[in-house]
């Protein structure tokens, strides 16, 4: 740090660990927008050191002599660096880097949702103990400032519901499958090439990344610490072109949704492919775009939309965090806002609603033998489990062969639905795994 207490800072040094997709974006934004950043801060924000395992690789952006280092501790131990940016990812070494930086009284910016949703409590407490700031806007929904909105702009609200498309890769895959008829594997490869996917893309495809982000959002909404284990999580692997086509016929689109709802003192926390009405604004969110639809008791419905992954949108959020910390440093303040925006004393445990008690409509697709009585056998089991049918579609005719049969239900209980599916799955008229998708009709309506 180059300032004395009380004196306006002329130069604030930051150090970056992880010169990958987002790290490169941060260097570019700081360089390309240096003028506007300086005009807003009234001081210079300098990236003094950049650490990455590989200092030889061409990142497509020029870095001054002496800035690059292969040792992250060079950044953390530099007494002139006030802010450490962690963009390595994962829950291993990244945690060590952040804890070491906090321990040395450095402010931290991170985009690491996996880490914060797993060790957020320990990390945030350390920041508070050391009286430093930790900012993490890029950890949810890339460039969309939804964390800032929850911590500040919507702070006066009790959040009644949240529906989010918060994984760019999964949304890119589903949109390409829906709009261009692309094949899952091909589209995933394209998402990886564009830098959207996690190092292990199963995090994107299996809903884990969405659940990490939902945990962070829920923690901000309700002042708590839940993690992956508290969130019911299903990914998009079972969704086929057939389901996308049927959804369209019923007037729905399929989206991987993160859902949180506060009902009677319990919070629903779930991530799964969801059929939503084609006319809902969330249904129109395509490609790597993300959107978060929130309902606050005072503000009513609010929706945020923008790019949720990729180099520059994510860097936009990281640099905005850096600028927030610079503003604090310029005023000699820190911890003005606690990480969750709740006081430590107010943070508490919440009760999560069991997925089995969910009561919503379902789409169920069977591959069933086309013969008289097949439908009545299936509907009989559904009826025995108190599940009533609202529509049935069987498109093809293949007497004695297997054809897709789709049923939409009225509101049914998840537990009953699963029991019925397990029973039907054993029938000899059923070929293949039965696929079911939850339907949300009234997203964001008042509870
Ligand atoms: P990348 O894999 O592109 O970048 C990470 C970089 O850190 C790599 O260059 C990696 O080197 C380097 N690294 C790994 N270990 C060390 C170490 N011990 N010391 C120094 N450098 C190391 O990831 P992204 O930039 O995509 O993601 C960074 C973070 O941002 C993650 O937490 C991610 O979840 C998050 N994020 C990413 C978004 C995106 O669109 N990409 C959007 C929002 C958040 P190597 O290549 O050799 O492993
Ligand atoms: N893999 C993540 C996504 C990156 O696709 O949304 C942004 O967090």
Image (cartoon, rainbow, N blue to C red):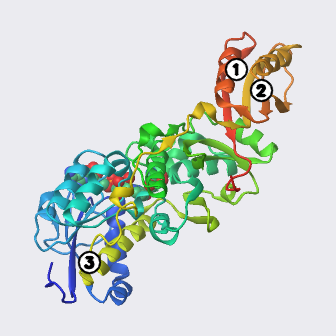
* Nearest to N terminus: mark 1 or mark 3: 3
Q: Nearer the viewer, residue 36 or 338?
A: 338
Q: Residue at x 57, y 53 (%)?
A: 165
Please indicate whether residue 158 sits to the left or right of residue 424 in the image.
left
- Disc 3 packing (10 Å; few <14; some 14–19; many ≥20): some
Q: Residue at x 75, y 53 (%)?
A: 278
SS label for mark 3: loop
Question: What separation in Å lies between label 2 and label 1 (alpha carbons)?
Answer: 9 Å
How far across and how far down the image is residue 65, in percent?
15, 74
Image: 224 above or below 422: below
Residue that label 3 marks:
333
Residue at the outermost right position? 372
Q: Residue at x 55, y 60 (%)?
A: 158
Residue that label 1 marks:
420
**Of the residues tagged 1 and 3, which is closer to the observer?**
3
Viewer can see residue 205: yes
Which label sits on residue 191?
A: none
How far across and how far down the image is residue 201, in percent?
44, 43
* Nearest to N terminus: mark 2 or mark 1: 2
Residue that label 2 marks:
387
């Amino acid at each position: 740090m180059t300032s004395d207490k009380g004196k306006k800072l002329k130069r604030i040094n930051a150090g970056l660990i992880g010169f990958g997709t987002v790290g490169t974006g941060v260097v570019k934004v700081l360089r390309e927008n240096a003028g506007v950043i300086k005009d807003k801060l009234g001081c210079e924000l300098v990236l003094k050191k950049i650490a990455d395992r590989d200092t030889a690789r061409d990142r497509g952006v020029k870095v001054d002599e002496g800035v690059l280092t292969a040792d992250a501790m060079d950044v953390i131990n530099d007494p002139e660096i006030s802010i450490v940016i962690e963009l390595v990812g994962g829950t291993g070494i990244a945690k060590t880097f952040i804890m070491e930086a906090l321990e040395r009284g450095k402010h931290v910016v991170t985009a690491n949702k996996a880490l914060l949703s797993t060790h957020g409590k320990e990390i945030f407490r350390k920041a508070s103990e050391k009286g430093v700031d930790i900012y993490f806007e890029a950890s949810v929904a890339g460039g969309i400032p939804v964390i800032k909105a929850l911590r500040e702009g919507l702070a006066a609200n009790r959040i009644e519901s949240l529906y989010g498309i918060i994984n760019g890769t999964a949304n890119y895959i589903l949109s390409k499958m829906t709009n261009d008829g692309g094949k899952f594997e091909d589209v995933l490869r394209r998402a990886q090439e564009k830098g959207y996917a996690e190092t292990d893309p199963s995090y994107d495809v299996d809903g884990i990344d969405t659940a990490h982000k939902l945990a962070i959002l829920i923690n901000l909404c309700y002042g708590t610490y839940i993690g992956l284990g508290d969130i019911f999580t299903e990914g998009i692997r079972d969704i086929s072109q057939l389901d996308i086509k049927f959804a369209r016929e019923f007037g729905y689109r399929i989206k991987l949704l993160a859902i949180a709802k506060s009902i009677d003192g319990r919070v629903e926390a779930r991530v799964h492919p969801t059929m939503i009405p084609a006319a809902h604004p969330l249904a129109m969110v395509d490609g790597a775009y993300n959107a978060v639809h929130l309902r606050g008791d005072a503000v009513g419905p609010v929706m945020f939309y923008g790019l949720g992954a990729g180099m520059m949108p994510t860097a936009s959020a990281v640099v905005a965090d850096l600028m927030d910390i610079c503003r604090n440093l310029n005023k000699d303040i820190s911890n003005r806002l606690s990480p969750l925006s709740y006081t430590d004393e107010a943070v508490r445990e919440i009760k999560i609603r069991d997925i089995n008690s969910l009561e919503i409509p379902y789409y169920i697709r069977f591959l069933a033998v086309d013969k008289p009585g097949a439908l009545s056998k299936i509907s009989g089991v559904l009826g025995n489990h108190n599940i009533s049918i609202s529509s049935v579609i069987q498109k093809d005719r293949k007497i004695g062969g297997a054809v897709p049969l789709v049923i939409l239900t009225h509101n049914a209980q998840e537990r009953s639905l699963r029991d019925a599916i397990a029973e039907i799955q054993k029938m000899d008229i059923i070929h293949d795994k039965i696929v079911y998708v939850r339907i949300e009709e009234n997203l964001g309506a008042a509870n």
